[in-house]
Image (tube, grey):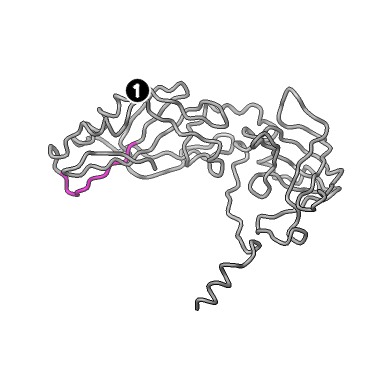
Amino acid sequence: MKKLLLFFLFLPSYVIACDCEQPLVALDFVRSEFVFWGTVVDKEYARDSQTYTVTFDVERHFKYNEIQPKTLKFTEQSEGEITGYGTSCDYSVSKGEKWLIYAYKYNDELFFGYPCSNSNRYNQLSDVNAEELEILENGNKIDLQKIDFSYTVIGGLSREFERATSENSINSLLAQLNPGYYRFEDDPFFESVAIRVDSTGILTDVMITDWMLVETKKLYGIPIYEYGKQSEPLSKVQEDILFNLKQSKKWQPARFSGVNVNSWVYLKVRIEKGKKPYATNY
């Protein structure tokens, strides 16, 4: 058995599975430096053959920028049959192909991240599905201030999202509660709390939730999920949790792709006899 295990441990990297979540089109549009339709006019391998550079002639820019280049270049890892290793995420770009590209910057370099983005090759622009085309046509009108962000909204773009953080310690506020003052059927006792913070860092709502995450609406093709508010009346401990958390009025707002945004922060509050109450994000 040991020999068999060692065999699998030393398998080359080409067996690694592709593990990424394709982002929502509207948010991919927002985070991208360039969104364009173009044709690959050149492909050149590096001397060591480990990478290649492709040049696109841009036929149409969808995202408005001060600079809208007529050509764009990207450096990609060479195909597995050339490098001798690869993953199921590997892809190849060939001269003459037409692509819809969502190009974003990472460490000051441009990437388009297929298959972990909405970039894709098509025979013609009209082959792109109608919903995506509509978002592309109206992408420059996307107003991030109309969206309440959370990790349930951003999908595969967690790198672009910074959660809102309180300038007061949430756990210090909760520590003012005395677990011995309340009667619980369960010990420890848990509550689900939702806190809304606007794009200026002001706390605008705090509520006990019913733990049920539901889709409330869609904006720009983005499903907006929220936890339902627990119906009244609230218990004494629930009232006190809300009262203490409302003292945290000033926050550092959430940010998406470098822009301050409205957001929900979801907390699981734990109260246990003989211990200080505390909260964790979820």
- Percent position of residue 127, x then y: 76, 46
Is 35 drawn above or below residue 204 in the view shown?
below
Let me know if residue 67 is in the magenta part: no
At which x and y percent is residue 260?
Answer: 51, 25
Observer-nearest residue: 143 or 14?
Answer: 14
Stretch in magenta: 184-193
* Mark 1: few/some/many CA within 10 Å (<14, 14-19, 20+): some
Identify the amino acid type marked 1: Lys
Given residues 203 and 233, the one toward you in this image is 203
Q: Is residue 129 left or right of residue 248?
A: right
Q: Is residue 188 magenta?
A: yes
Most foreground residue, 113 or 261: 113
Indicate whether 275 appears above or below 253.
below
Residue closest to the far bottom: 1
| 175 relative position to 248: left or right | left
The C terminus: image quadrant: top left
Q: Residue 82's x, y, as percent?
A: 78, 59
Q: How many numbered dots are placed on residues in this image?
A: 1
Q: Residue at x 80, y 29 (%)?
A: 69
Mark 1: secondary structure: loop
Residue 89: percent from the left, percent from the top? Answer: 66, 55
Quarter of the image for residue 87 reads: bottom right
Q: Which residue is mark 1?
A: 249
Residue displayed at 45% across by 26% down = 253
Q: Along the line of sight, which residue is nearer the eye, 86 or 249?
A: 86
